[in-house]
């Protein structure tokens, strides 16, 4: 299934799923006569209890709560996730980005997957404008995949982590590179260089839909980024060094993970301007449209504004 959040005509936010043809959206609360929630976080926390009821609703002849996707205003599928950890898991990106700063990959990177916490209250959705943070002049995109935690767990082993994943979506970890570079010289961060916005969407795809792309413990998913229709980044999720299982094992070490938490993969190789070099493409400016596309996960677009 593909889960979305959207704005209804009365201004309220609702949770829904796309129909199989991708043309319509089912409002799960209306379709279930109020038995299912209008918030995806609540649904995810209770999805084992709710899934049979949802399947029953979708298989019935629905007359209420079905809307055309065309013209519907989507929000981030999880507008306020429980938390957001972003990892640094693609070796090509790590090597190239550090080389451009005259640095080598530290040996510790190969010992365990590393992450930072970002702002889970600054999540943006599809087609939502991204404001350039002041005083940045080096705004960048980052082409990533996110997984959504589906049940609580602590000290989860990598080989068991699949049971704790609800689904996946596209993630754009917007970065103000000039702000980020200065603060990281102090030995902390990234913080304000990332704090202003992270885009996710357009929907959360349940893991059963992604299994068709599985290759052992990885997925063959083509990842692309375009700026104003021009292809800049092209990679594949199967090239990731650390799997989501390994990331979840690291994140859950002596810490409880909860449903609705987001874990980002980090940037795929070639997946940002920092890595490509400003000689390949200038930093993002107001009016630019960035589109991230990933096999099975759809397309996520945002326009840059002042």
Image: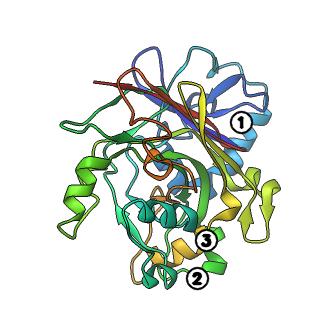
Name which residue lies at 75% across and 41% down: 56
Residue 237, by quadrant, is: bottom right
Q: What residue did someone put label 1 on?
A: 57
Q: Position of residue 287 (x, y in %)?
A: 40, 20
Q: What residue did someone put label 3 on?
A: 241
In primary-sequence order, the first of circles 1 and 2 is 1
Q: Helix or strand or loop: what does disc 3 sit on?
A: loop
Q: Could you give the CA–CA distance between mark 3 and mark 1, rounded to whole angstroms?
A: 40 Å
Q: What residue did someone put label 2 on?
A: 157
Side of 181 relative to 270 (left or right): left
Q: Position of residue 89 (x, y in %)?
A: 53, 67
Q: Helix or strand or loop: what does disc 2 sit on?
A: loop
- Is 35 situated above or below 188? above
Side of 141 relative to 25 (left or right): left
- The N terminus - image quarter: top right
Badge 3: few (under 14), some or many (20 or more) residues near its Cα, within 10 Å?
some
Name which residue lies at 57% across and 28% down: 30
In primary-sequence order, the first of circles 3 and 2 is 2
- The C terminus - image quarter: top left
In primary-sequence order, the first of circles 3 and 1 is 1
């Amino acid at each position: 299934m593909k889960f979305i959040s959207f704005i209804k005509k009365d201004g309220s936010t609702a949770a829904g799923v796309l129909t199989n043809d991708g043309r319509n959206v089912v409002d799960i609360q209306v379709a279930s006569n109020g038995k299912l929630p209008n918030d995806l976080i609540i649904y995810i926390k209770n999805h084992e209890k709710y899934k049979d009821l949802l399947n029953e609703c979708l298989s019935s002849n629905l007359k209420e709560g079905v809307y055309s996707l065309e013209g519907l205003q989507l929000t981030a599928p999880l507008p306020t996730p429980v938390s957001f950890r972003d990892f640094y898991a693609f070796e090509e990106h790590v090597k190239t980005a550090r080389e451009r700063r005259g640095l080598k990959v530290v040996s510790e990177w190969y010992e365990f997957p590393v992450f930072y916490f970002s702002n889970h209250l600054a999540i943006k959705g599809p087609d939502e404008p991204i404001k350039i943070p002041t005083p940045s002049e080096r705004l960048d995109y980052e082409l990533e995949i996110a997984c959504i935690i589906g049940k609580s767990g602590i000290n989860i082993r990598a080989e068991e982590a699949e049971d704790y994943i609800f689904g996946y979506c596209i993630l754009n970890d917007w970065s103000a590179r000039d702000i980020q570079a200065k603060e990281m010289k102090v030995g902390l961060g990234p913080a304000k260089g990332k704090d202003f916005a992270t885009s996710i969407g357009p929907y959360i795809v349940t893991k059963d839909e992604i299994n068709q792309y599985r290759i052992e413990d990885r997925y063959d998913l083509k990842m692309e980024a375009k700026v104003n229709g021009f292809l800049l980044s092209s990679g594949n999720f199967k090239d990731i060094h650390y799997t989501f299982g390994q990331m979840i094992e690291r994140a859950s070490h002596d810490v409880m993970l909860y449903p609705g938490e987001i874990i980002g993969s980090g940037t795929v190789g070639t997946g940002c301007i920092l890595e490509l070099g400003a000689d390949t493409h200038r930093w993002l400016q107001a009016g630019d449209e960035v589109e991230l596309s990933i096999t099975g996960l759809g397309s996520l677009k945002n326009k840059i504004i002042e």
